Image (cartoon, rainbow, N blue to C red):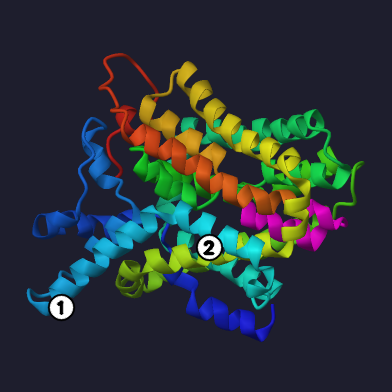
Amino acid sequence: MKFHTSITLCILPTLAGAFAPVSHQNHLTVTSALPKISHFSVSTPNVCASNNDLKSALFMSTTSADSPEEGLGSKIFQAYVKTANVATTLFPLWTVLFTGIALKSPSSFDWFTTDYFTGALAALMLSMGITLTPADFTKVASRPNSVVMQFSLCYAMMPFLALGLGKAFNLDPAMMAGMVLVGSINGGQASNLCTYIARGNVALSVLMTTATTLGAIFMTPLLCKLLLGAVVPVDARGIAISTIQVVLAPIAIGMSTNKFFPKFVKAILPFAPVVGVVSTCLLVASAVAQVSDQILGAGLALQIPILLLHLIGGLVGYLLPRSTGFGEVASRTMAIETSMKSSAFGFLLAKLHFGEFSARVPSAVSVVWMALTGSILAVIWRYIPVKKNTTFDRSLVEKYPPFN
């Protein structure tokens, strides 16, 4: 990475944690402070008592900072919190607006080069890393049922669904390759926010995102080589190296920062949401701007299969777990995790390691539909109460006590 990318990483790194909850270690401090600042909390009735432990990044970050003194400073801080809450919740709207600007005036985002694009993606991965501790991975290993199910949906069902839709809509080989790539990448960080909106299990969402993100290091290049090796040129080794650089390294750095500089992480979290939304919007706009002519030229023949990929993925991601004994909360969480892919990362991989230019177009289109589909599912579920279970289910939230 060039020097200016390093500067980007220094500016954005831990500030981009808009879509991930804070670590459980920090959460213990937050819980004890709730009575003092309960007006920042959002009640989520009918889910379960432990959902108080599963607040979104925005609410967690606002409570993690020391309570400001009463007066002008307190009022300003509260006004900022409310504004940031609205801005973060409406991130799909900003996604659509930035997409429209990118399609109408692609040159507006010429300055956001590949190096900046890579830096911004790494910053988002770093934002997830600063919320994690080694104990989180122990929890995944001790309670693997939900994580294993969602991992299978992400890397078994979605790639073959993408391949099937590409063939059904008779996409050309390059577009087909891009479509399969979208289906073969990890879950996106925005899924954590949508899970919160849907009254899902945010802690579980973060663990699933982490599992599929780390899994992308070997699953994405493997799937691309197996499914596309005979279709278009695929640099599987390059995909693996890029995944390590953009995914594994930032997460490791973030975890180290959380461990050795917890006060710094705690201090910057209240300012993370807006920075995270801006970073995501720039990634979306840059991807769309670079292939705007191809997107407009492809028309509905490309829009429909990609929309169906995310929509069907979300529905199967809900119905399959629900029908196999998982609870409502866990099923909602898996549905959103399955539907919302890290499309911006897919765009970067297509740009760097696929021989055909058109292979990057599906990822750019997916960025928009991924955000809209996940948000629609989240809003619908937010207004459908979760009934208290009277029979056995495997919901991680209800089968096990709250994370401590």
User: Is residue 326 in view from this perspective?
Assistant: yes
Would you name the residue on which mark 1 appears?
A: 73
Relative placement, left or right, of 379 versus 128 is left
Q: Quadrant of the N terminus?
A: bottom right
4 part of magenta stretch: no
Q: How many marks?
A: 2
Please report the residue visible at 44 percent of the width from the left and 70 percent of the height from the top. 14
Element carrying mark 2: helix
Residue 279 image position (x, y, % from top left)? 51, 67
Please report the residue visible at 58 percent of the width from the left and 45 percent of the height from the top. 369
Q: Which residues are magenta?
A: 342-359
**Nearer the viewer's eye, disc 1 or disc 2?**
2
Relative placement, left or right, of 69 versus 137 is left
User: Is residue 32 in view from this perspective?
Assistant: no
Q: Real-space Cα distance between discs 1 and 2?
A: 30 Å
Residue 281 badge: 2
Residue 38 image position (x, y, % from top left)? 13, 54
Task: Inspect the image, locate mark 2, and give the three-letter code of the amino acid beneath it.
Answer: Cys
Please report the residue visible at 72 percent of the width from the left and 48 percent of the height from the top. 362
Where, by quadrant of the figure, is residue 64 drawn?
bottom left
Chain-order first, disc 1 or disc 2: 1
Q: Is residue 324 above or below residue 270?
A: above
Task: Inspect the image, locate mark 1, and give the three-letter code of the amino acid beneath it.
Answer: Gly
Which residue sits furthest front? Answer: 104
Q: State if disc 2 and disc 1 touch (CB < 8 Å).
A: no
Element carrying mark 1: helix
Of 385 and 238, the residue lying toward us: 385
What secondary structure is the stretch in magenta mostly built from? helix
Of 400 and 162, the residue lying toward us: 162
Of 146 and 39, the residue lying toward us: 39
Q: Residues within 10 Å of mark 2 (few under 14, many from 20)?
A: many
Please report the residue visible at 33 percent of the width from the left and 33 percent of the height from the top. 397
